[in-house]
Image (cartoon, rainbow, N blue to C red):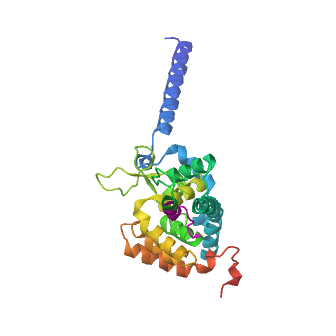
Amino acid sequence: MKTGSVNKVIIALAVVVASLLAVKLLLVDLQPSEEGSQGQLLKNKRQYSQIPDFEAIADVAEKKKAFFDFLRPAVQHHNNIIAEERKFLLASLQHLVDGEVLSEAELFRIQQLASKYQYSMRSVTVNNLNQLLRRVDIIPEDLVLIQAANETGWGSSRFAKEGLNFFGQWCFRKGCGLVPQSRSEGMSHEVAVFNSVDDSVGSYMRNLNSNAAYSLLRSIRADLRAQGEPIRADKLVYGLLNYSERQEAYIEELLDMLRHNNQFLVENYEQGSAV
């Protein structure tokens, strides 16, 4: 074979080999990593840019303040929404007590709220509105913030970073979220993935205000309302007994966190103000 022909063959083979390597590398990029096989959703890598790197904050006080300040706007936003919904329901309740006929617009919105908070309401009566009002009420800001800190390890958990899930909420449709690496055999739940921090907080609040597991929390809150007492985190926390398998130990842990982080939970806290 002539030298020129040999060179052409070598070049052709080199091109083929290079092409095969390129294809192989592309396929490797498309394959899920070992971590991915445990439930990491590649499409959620974009979530990393949505939350600060709390682990990189060396000063503990600064980290706690940063974490609370990051979540606080979403908590306040949803509590404001709930407060407006409650104000509307209270006005409608007063209309019924006064013997007034509710408008079609009022009835429609009441049914919308009943659906949102998973309360079955066949007719709009004084009793039904009172029952719905037990669900449509705020969650103390400090309780939300402390529970988020507990559930995420101050924003360092995989579920917070990848799924913007700050409260360990589950979902039950295959592929709906992230598969826990420590999930027990036979279990099928996943940890829900959210598009935003705001969605995570809103879902958590609806869960507490509608799920039967937290009826005790709603009863405690309603009793405080009836007595004219403020809605306090250290009272409502006992209604979270079913939030964790650890139950009483979980409640004690949250109470301890509330006590030890009180100064950080105050909005506009300044590090130098702590005694």
Q: Position of residue 251 (x, y in %)?
A: 43, 75
Q: Residue at x 48, y 27 (%)?
A: 20
Q: Residue at x 45, y 52 (%)?
A: 120
Does residue 197 sit above or below 222 in this rendering?
Answer: above
Does residue 270 sit above or below 17 in this rendering?
Answer: below
The magenta stretch spans residue 136: yes
Q: Nearer the viewer, residue 249 or 78?
A: 78
In the image, is 104 to the left or to the right of 257? right
Q: Position of residue 207 (x, y in %)?
A: 48, 58
Farthest residue, direction top: 1
Farthest residue, direction left: 186
Does residue 99 sit above or below 177 in this rendering?
Answer: below
Residue 167 appearing in the image: no
The magenta stretch spans residue 134: yes
Q: Which residues are magenta?
A: 130-140
Q: Residue at x 40, y 45 (%)?
A: 173
Residue 209 appearing in the image: yes
Q: Residue at x 44, y 59 (%)?
A: 211
Q: Position of residue 256 (x, y in %)?
A: 49, 80
Q: Nearer the viewer, residue 95 or 11?
A: 95
